[in-house]
Image (cartoon, rainbow, N blue to C red):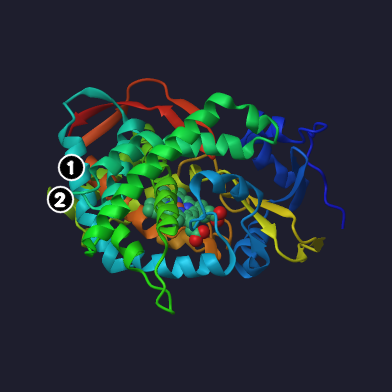
Amino acid sequence: MAVPVAPGRWPVLGHTPVLLRRRFGFTDGLRQHGDLVRVYLGRLLTYFVTSAELTHQVLVTRSASFEKGAMFDKFRPFTGNGLVNSGGAFHLRQRRLIQPAFHRERIAHYAEKMAVAVAELCGSWKPDETREINDDMQALAVTIVGAALFGTELGGSAIEESRRSIPVVIRQGMIRALSPEPVGRLLVRGNRQLDQAVTRMRSVVDELIAGWRAEGRDRGDLLSTLLLARDTDGTPMTDQQVYDEVITLLSAGIETSALALAWLFHELARHPDVERRVHDEVDRVLGGRRVTFDDVPKLTYLRQVIDETLRMYPIWILMRRTTEPVELGGVRIPRDTEVTVSPHALHFDPRSFPHPERFDPDRWAPDAAGEIPRGAFIPFGAGNRQCVGNAFALLEMAVTAATIVSRWRLTLARPLRVAYTSTAYPTRLSMTVTPR
Ligand code: HEM
């Protein structure tokens, strides 16, 4: 079966110009050409998957025939061979070693640290001042992931450095990864910033590892889990592997949660009816006290708001490469071929989500949610590469939102500014914070 080529292809540059210009408009529009569409990133061919069912096959049922692929090869020099970038048996081993750090009991232990961090943040707000909520959420996410990773006593310098360097690694790394060579090499200033950020992070994390090794004590943080982890044959991770996993968890766990939270407050401000229901629920469940891990399952409407936020503001694209020939939707895709799926395009597919442009938490009400087809809602990916931090992130969002709305009302102070990399992120989300 012939697979159509997406419109707008240029010689040499392929679809990169139209992709960078039209972004979601381009990728969301591909479904009208079929379940599989050929897209060229420069000269690199990728089969773009547009249906929920085929996405599920790529990420879950046929995942054994795929590895991470070209974009991750480009990321590896900056963010190492951690969980996000690695593959095969090595990835499986690392995932087994790291996953316990995200088990329910460990996460429950982080809930309190999260609540303290949020309370500290909004304790610094002054009534009716205007805050850049995107910056506040970024700083908060660094504190939360940093405290979980490094603990609070020793981790101060690493948390501080992460605040400065991780956004550079993510944004410059993404621009670099999406740019076809030799264009990527010409981004001199961005590349320099990227190299400097990587070097600074390296030295601060190496110092922490050396400090931990000198002491050799389990401090109950994620770094301790990584350093104490042993393979079935008793082998620990090398310092290089620990470093790679640390930088991976920081790059994967900060910007994503911060963005989701910023969008959540943006949507609450734009939908007073939704905001009122969230306030009522939080007031009823918390009765004015600090949120705990056990409160979170009771905040059911807030969870619907979180899901709807993750639906509307997900990661743009996820890429894979075939490790053997695969048949997908009646098409035989050869080995070593790039395949792309788009959480954004799937989340805006009206076949799965009627009126997808509407922010409607009620589509997640218990009686409605069952109708969503498999593969259609993948904010955390799916299958063997599903986000290892998803429960952590959901908890972080619930704790942050509940803590803030129990005391404050946030209204938009200025028009929003948005920029695009791996997704849409607000570069300016000025909100006035008013005590409730
Ligand atoms: C709202 C917040 C978050 C979102 C939307 C999100 C989204 C995702 C997605 C879509 C993937 C799959 C990528 C793929 O299949 O190629 C992923 C993987 C990953 N995420 Fe998250 N993430 C979030 C928060 C976090 C947090 C808080 C952490 C850790 C502290 C984290 C760590 C990771 C790691 C390590 C992977 C790679 C897993 C693997 O390949 O085995 N993420 N994330």
Look at mark 1 in the image and give the residue it sits on: 119
Q: Is residue 124 left or right of residue 213?
A: left
Q: Is residue 70 left or right of residue 242?
A: right
Which quarter of the rendered picture does the C terminus lie within? top left
Residue type, label 1: Ala
Question: Of helix, strand and loop, which one carries label 1?
Answer: helix
Look at mark 2 in the image and give the residue it sits on: 290
Percent of width and height locating residue 188: 58, 26
State the residue at coordinates (64%, 58%): 55
State the residue at coordinates (52%, 64%): 91
Work out whether 146 lies above or below 365. Answer: above
Work out whether 194 lies above or below 345. Answer: above
Percent of width and height locating residue 3: 83, 51
State the residue at coordinates (21%, 52%): 113
Quadrant in the picture for residue 375? bottom right
**Sequence-first disc among 1 and 2:** 1
Looking at this view, is 124 or 147 the one in front?
Answer: 147
Residue type, label 2: Arg
State the residue at coordinates (87%, 53%): 2
